[in-house]
Amino acid sequence: MKLFNKIIHFVILIIFLIIQVAFAEYLGMYSVSIDLIMVTVVCIALVDGMTIGMAMGFISGLVFDLMAGNIVGISSFLYTLNAFLAVKVMDLGIKKMGASLALIIFLVTEINIFIEGLLRYLFNFNVDVAQLGRDILIRPLFSIALVFLIFPIINLGQRRRWVLGFRNEEEN
Amino acid sequence: MVFLNKKFRNIVVFVVIIVLCIIVITVSFRNLDFVNNIKSNILDFFKPVQEKVFTAFSPVIGFFNGIRDYINLRGKYLKLQEENAALRQKYVDNINLQIENSSLRELLKLKERNDYKTIAGKVIGYNQSNWQSEVILNIGKNEGVEEGMGVINESGLLGVVKISGDKSCTVRLLNDPQSNIGCRILTSRILGILEGDSEGHLFLRHIPKDLNIFLGDIIMTSEYSEDIPGGIIIGRIKYVEERMGEAYQEIEVEPFVDFKNLEYVMVIREK
């Protein structure tokens, strides 16, 4: 059953990957793009564990870069790091509830933007400060909205369920 | 102990994956042929699914595009009215020039330029971020598409084929930060290089300060490119600035192609 869930999660990840590539242009506002793959990888890492999350992050990032990327390996690096960080934040002992999920995705998105900017700078791309500012402000909001749509799909059929409200009655 | 082991295992997996990523990035940077082969095979592998997904969601995209177009309608109408008036004037001038041109050709016995051949394709994927601006087409080597070929639509040049698989290809759009294309200003015949930036804007580079550049001048491809024929329109000059201490002018170009609304395109097969 566990293996079946993981396969299903991988299929979901591939579907979101195809949607990301097919509709990247339409997924976003104010020139800030939505990262469906990042949110899905974080959700999988939180549900299936760090190792599975990192492996799926690496594979999806690699496929994404091979399909539509400039430098192969950058997305793999970022998504692996996202899965690692998400579970590390969770391991700090926060409760499994909606607010925690929003906090995790907020932190991961901000770190992602920072590392992406740093890599862009290191690989000699122009770093646009205005765009970076827009990303820092708007992208986490998109990610938080998305995580509440994607997480319930990934969390379906799991024994240890998350409570997506802002109070976890089970643990109180 | 078990907890420690699990924690240790996670760290090992993390380090291994990061090392793998660094190896992949290094290999990718060397731009080896086999990386491009893998890329084209992956494109071909996902093409059927991607095409289906794109077609299935097309009505939704059309609906949102419709809303966007409706919001911008008034501004576009006023702009088109202005453009129409200018074009009417140019049309009259053009007829005079055509008569003059044909009589001069007659005099010089010059041959008319051969038209290029094209392959029609459909956009089945986008990848537009700070890093790049690309689209994926449903045509590839089987249809005769090769790397470096120019891609146009009814509004003008939109990009160059970057990687060509058997059944699909990726096109680097003009506004990609790594795009650079030789071009010419229509009226003054000045040559320059058109480059994209991370915000998706187009800039005409290497135009010295002492040359006069006028707003609204048309930019077209230069005839010196190996794969792209000259004279294909690209856009018009939107903004010119002379910066202190810099040898060249800062010239922004407004493309004729709407990069956010690409559907059917044509790849230029022969010059």
Image (cartoon, helix red, strand yellow):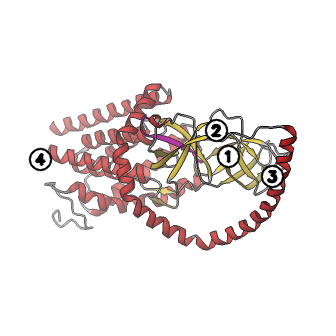
Which residue lies under the disc numbered 1?
Answer: B232
Which of discs 2 and 4 lies nearer the camera? The answer is: 2
The residue at the point 40 percent across, 39 percent down is B43
Distance in Å between CA atoms under marks 1 and 3: 18 Å
The residue that disc 2 covers is B228
Q: Secondary structure at mark 1?
A: loop
Q: Amino acid at mark 3?
A: Gln
Range drawn in magenta: B165-176
Whether labels 2 and 4 belong to a single chain: the reply is no
Foreground residue among B169 and B87? B87
Q: Amino acid at mark 1?
A: Ile
Q: CA distance from mark 4 to mark 1?
A: 59 Å
Alpha carbon distance from label 2 to label 4: 56 Å
Taking the view exactly as shown, the residue that stands out farthest to the bottom is: B74
Q: Quadrant of the N terminus of chain B?
A: top left
Do discs 1 and 2 share a chain?
A: yes
